[in-house]
Amino acid sequence: MSVRPATPADDAAVARICLLTGAQGGDATGLFGDDTALADVYATPYLRGPGGFCLVWDVDGEARGYVLGTSDTAAFQRWFVDEWWPRVGPTHRALTAGDAWLLPSAADPARMLVPVLAAYPAHLHIDLLPDQQGRGAGRALIAAACALLAARGAPGVHLVAERANVGAQAFYPRVGFAAVVADDAVVTFARALA
C-alpha cells in the first residue's frame, strides 16, 4: 500500500472510485443518467486541467482511493467552464433527479469560487473505497497532497463536504482542516500550507 501519482492507466479506476463513493461516501451507481456523469464533474477533469493533480492509494498495483484537485481553483474553474464542460457536458442528458442538480451546477461559472479562495486558492477531493477506510490511507493521501500543493507555492487549500457525509465531517479536522464557511447543505474546510 502506497501513495503514488496517477497515470493515464488509472483514469477508469479514478472514475469508478468517484462513482462508488459519490453519495455522501456511499455508492452513487444509478443516481445519474449515466454512471460517468459524476466523475466528469468531480474527478476526471483534475487529470487534465490547469494545476490539476491526482495521487492514488495503490494496493497491489490497483488504485483503491485518490486525492485530486488543483493548485489554482480560479484558473481551473475558468478552464472547466470554457473548455472541459462544453466538450463533455453534452454527452450527459438530464434523466434523473441527480442529473437535474449535477448538470446545471457543473455549468455554473461560479461553482468553485468559494468565499475563502484568496487565502486558500487550492482545493482537493478525496475518496477511498470502503475497504480502505480506517487504515491510514486518507491521512497519507492528505499529507501527500498538502506537501505537493505547498511545493507548488499554494498558501492554502480548501475542500467542500456535504453535511450529510458524517464521516468526512469528522475526518477533516483530524488532518488539520478547520471549518471556515458553512450552510445547511455543505461545510467548507480549509488548511494553511505556508
Image (cartoon, rainbow, N blue to C red):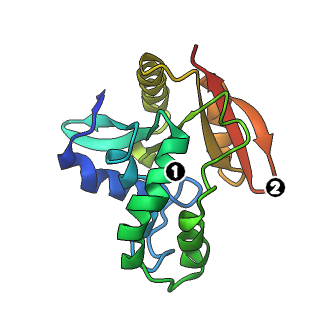
Q: Look at the image and tell me whether residue 96 can be seen.
A: yes
Against 170, residue 130 (above or below) is below
**Nearer to us in this view, 35 or 80:** 80
Element under disc 2:
loop
Image quarter of residue 61: top left
Q: In this view, does 101 lie to the left or right of 71?
A: right
Q: Mark 2–mark 1 contact, CB under 8 Å?
A: no
Residue 177 image position (x, y, % from top left): 65, 27
Q: Which amino acid does label 1 sit on?
A: Gln
Q: Residues within 10 Å of mark 1 (few under 14, many from 20)?
A: many
If the image is split into quadrants, where does the C terminus sit? Answer: top right
Q: Circle 2 is placed at which residue position?
A: 184
Which residue is rendered at x = 51% and y = 83% of the image? 94
Q: Which amino acid does label 2 sit on?
A: Asp
Residue 77 image label: 1
Image quarter of residue 57: top left
Q: How crowded is mark 2: few (under 14 residues within 10 Å), some or many (20 or more)?
A: few
Element under disc 1:
helix
Which residue is rendered at x = 48% and y = 28% of the image? 142
**Nearer to us in this view, 33 or 128:** 33
Residue 4 image position (x, y, % from top left): 28, 29
Against 188, residue 138 (above or below) is above
Against 90, residue 73 (above or below) is above
Q: In this view, does 82 lie to the left or right of 63?
A: right
Residue 82 image position (x, y, % from top left): 45, 60
- Report how far apart the C-alphas of labels 2 and 1 lie in the structure: 24 Å
Q: Residue furthest bottom?
A: 95
Residue 67 image position (x, y, % from top left): 43, 38
Image quarter of residue 86: bottom left
